[in-house]
Structures are given as structure tokens and as C-alpha cells.
Image (spheres, helix red, strand yellow):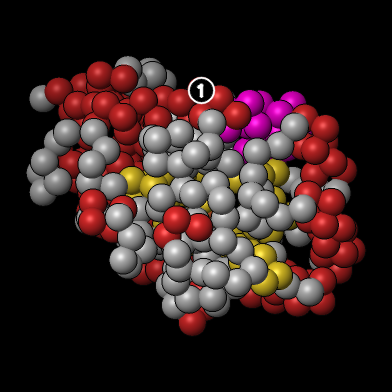
Amino acid sequence: MRVEELLKKRRSGGVLSREELVFLLGLPLDSAETYMIMAEANRLSKEHSDGKAEVHAQFALNLAPCSCDCLFCSFAKINDVFHEATELSVEQAVSYARQFEVDGANAVFMMSTAGYPFERFIEVAGEIRRNLNPETTLVANVGDQTLKNAKRLKDAGFAGVYHALRLREGTDSTLSPEKRKESIRNFQEAGLEVGTCVEPVGPEHTNEELAEMIAFTASFDPSFSGAARRIPIPGTAMAKRGVISELRMAQIVAVTRLGMPDSVMGNCTHEPCTLGAIAGANLFWAEVGANPRDIEEKTEEGRGGTVSDCRSIFRESNWDVLDGPSRFYNRKR
Ligand code: SF4
């Protein structure tokens, strides 16, 4: 059977070709072969992270209608969801970050919309860094940056960033795919680990597009890759395209793990679910405050899960959860 051959190839250190990834992504969801792929991805993820999953936790510094107009994002001006710009005070930001630390998050993510002033981001980051334990892993989720700004993030105490070239970037967003890639290079050159993901996956994305994106994420040795489905924002044009099932997302999560080199420890999915975890996801996110997949101003009152929710989904899926700072963002090389 071809699947067994491909799994054997991967197990012996072989790199799956684009065509082989497409083949795996095209297997029927309910087939024994898809479950074999998920089982192998689970085994690989456990091997690479010593059986320890991670829970990272993100808060947004601001909420604002964003002119970048990524069609899948609730902040996009064009989606007409949020009309007022608000931002956290430094005290509120510190309090969110400290709460995540107390809750046992393995990394604290600070997010802002693309238009948030970079100087302000660095200023708040400094206050947060001073108020967290020195060993707590801090991660930035910001817009495209120059090398100079990437170095400033490193100097401000960030271990890494989250940055993704999103599916159909430049078509379903107004951002330049080349700039996204350039930013990833800048972050890495500045000494920041880059976590990424194949996202946001919708029913219209072909297996060829997904395989292409899996191979792209593998090409820059991220701290983690993974896959996340698109959450429809009610009333938007993109919501009409629909949503993939959790099982389809789990299949893509599994194939993404198989498509990564062994140096990549992490494999994420969002939103957290047991199917994703048994298919080899070893990273989930908890969220508070503004969330680009939610229409609630405070996602903790909407879609966002807590650190404790994420830990419990991992346990239900037979995963232990790491205690202490993220190993994905602090790889020993
Ligand atoms: S994904 Fe980021 S850049 Fe795009 S509209 Fe939302 S906040 Fe703006």
C-alpha cells in the first residue's frame, strides 16, 4: 500500500515530496489510511517533544478596524465588525501577561493589529518583561517588520515571533506575500525563533495549495508549524465559503507534521480540539482580549479558551503538558 511506503520513507528520515503530500491530503477522511497518518504524526510529535505538549497564551494589546483588510479577520475594516479603536493600558497588559504566567502558559504572546505603533509595542513589552519571571517565554505577534525592528524585538526580551504567510496571501488580503517572507527572514536573522502555521484553511483550498504551504513552512525551519481552519466571521463574504470539519483539519495537521523536518519540535492547531491533538498537534493557544476570529471584544466571553481548557483537551487526548518555559521557542541548536 502506498501510504505504508510513504510512512516508512518518512520514518527513515526521507523528505516527502510535494506530490506525496498532495496524495496524503487527498485520502478519504474516514479511511484507515487517514487514521494511520494521524497515528504516525502523533507518534512523531510525541517523539520530538518527549511526549510533552505546550499551551501558549495570547492577549491583544489593541482592538482596531484594520485597513489591511484580510478577508478572514474580524478586525478588517471591510468586514465592518468593529468600529471603535481601543487599547489596553500598560497595567492591563501586565495583568493579562502575569495571569497567563500564573495559569502555567508555556509562552506568553503579545499581539497587536498591523497598525499599532511599533514604539508603543516596544514600550509596553519592556514593562511586561520587567514584571514577568526572567525565564518566562515572551513571543510577539505583530505585522511585517524590518531587520532593525526585528532586532529591537529581540533586545526587548522576546524569544520569538508568530508569523505566517497566509493561504492566498495577497488575494484574500492586501498584504504582500514577498513582504511576509522577508519579515520571516528578518526575524530569524535577528535571532528570533519563528512559529508559523498553514492557515486559515477553508473548503476552497486545494490539496496542491496546502502541500505548497506545508513545504514553504518546512523550508525555513520554524519552531513549530501546523494547521488551523478558518473560523467564519458571521455576515462576511468569506463566511459564505464555509468551514472545513475538525477531522479534515486533523488530517492536514497530521500531514503537516509528516512534511516537517525533524528539527521542528512543534505542531500547532487552532482552535483546540481532541481530534487535532490525536493527529499530532502538540501546541494549542489560550486567548483573552481581542481576537481576529471572534466578534466579541473580549474573546474570553466568546470563542477563546483558557490555559486550563487547553491543558484538559490535551489530557483527554492522552498528552502530558509541559511545565515551564516553552521548548519550541528555546530550541537547543
Ligand atoms: S489579520 Fe492582522 S493585518 Fe490582517 S486585517 Fe487582521 S489585524 Fe489587520
93 relative to 43, above or below: below
Residue extent of the magenta highlight: 180-195
29 relative to 93, above or below: above
- Report which quarter residue 105 is drawn in: bottom right
* Percent of width and height locating residue 131: 86, 68
Residue toward you, 114 or 193:
114
* Percent of width and height locating residue 53: 51, 55
* Percent of width and height locating residue 30: 11, 49
Please check the rendered image and state whether residue 1 is part of the magenta-colored stretch, yes or no.
no
* Percent of width and height locating residue 208: 27, 26
Determine if residue 212 is in view: yes
Q: Which residue is mark 1?
A: 219
Amino acid type, callout 1: Ser
- For mark 1, give the secondary structure: helix
Residue toward you, 294 or 19:
294
Determine if residue 51 is in view: no
